[in-house]
Image: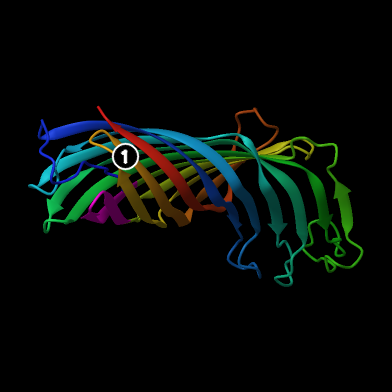
Amino acid sequence: MLNCTLWAQEPPPKSYALSSWTSFGTFLGQAEEIVYPPSDHKAKLLSELLWDIMPVFYYGLSLDFSRAQPLEKWGFFATLSLRNGIPGKSGKMEDSDWMSAENDALTHFSSHDNFTNELFIFDVSAGVSLPLSQSLLLKPYITMSYMRFSFTGQYGYGKYAREIGGAYSGIYASIDDNPDTVSFANWEKVINYTQNWITVAPGVALGYYFYRFYAELFFNISPLVSCADIDEHLPTSPPQVFKDYMQGGIFLEPGFHFSFFAGRRLEFSQDFSWRYMGGTRGPTWYGSPIGTGTFVQNGEAGAGLSLFNIGLCIKIRL
């Protein structure tokens, strides 16, 4: 939770101040896509797709409205921020399946280059600042976040265990026993995947002022999580699309913010935070070919995200 202010010892011309900041940074992490099996399946998962975010650079803009001198008395604050990732290659994408009806052995595996098309995060926060002493500040608040991530798996290869019990028998040889192999070297787009997240979370921040510096620890947590995603498998004939609508699970975000006040109107800061969503589940819908508009429910899906942020901020009081 970011709320940069002026020195407590300098009398402000107004009770509240509007500030804007520009930020630059990098995200490191991974998005997760899960398909859960029927209750009688041997393996815990039917399918898992992991999408690297290693790294994705971003730029951001923000507006902050808060007390000009938060240590003098309690007050309200509100922050609006957005961060937009720069498209580019961001590591690997791996697709693993456990299709066997006999055991929990891996049966299908493919690896591709991952290209991040979109990474957009929009946060709105509002709360109360409560001075605890001449240098200590407590800030309870509520944050609403919208996040959109879009990836494309490119090129790569696939390795698939032979089905030795006949078609759809669920009986496979070991994936290391003369598997079928496929090259996707000529496929610029193998799989497209998009996640849309909405979270609402209470949080608390504890800040400390000393000389020209400000340090703040913050923590957000909530079960109010929803995710809608779209997964397009392009090499299949015809191409397939899956749409998942999931809720629940957990949202966590611990972080640290450190600022240096260069003047009454200028501030430089650095942010470190980790954003995690997991345990979100819901129905999945299947359609083929892509664009037909006809979908049938096809089991249960899940989604997750782990995202570490390192950011630099320049803030100007208006």
Element assignment for label 1: strand
Q: Quadrant of the C terminus?
A: top left
Q: Position of residue 133 (x, y in %)?
A: 11, 58
Furthest toward the left, the residue is 73
Q: Quadrant of residue 215?
A: bottom left
Q: Position of residue 262 (x, y in %)?
A: 30, 40
Q: Position of residue 298 (x, y in %)?
A: 60, 48
- Circle 1 residue: 267
Between 30 and 179, the one lying in front of the other is: 30
Image point 70% across, 32% down: which residue?
Answer: 289
Numbered range of the magenta stretch: 200-218
Q: Is residue 317 magenta?
A: no
Furthest toward the right, the residue is 178
Horizontally, residue 107 falls left or right of residue 197, namely right
Callout 1: 10 Å neighbours few (<14), some, many (20+)? Answer: many
Question: What secondary structure is the magenta-colored segment mainly?
Answer: strand
Between 135 and 82, the one lying in front of the other is: 135
Q: How is the image coloured?
A: rainbow
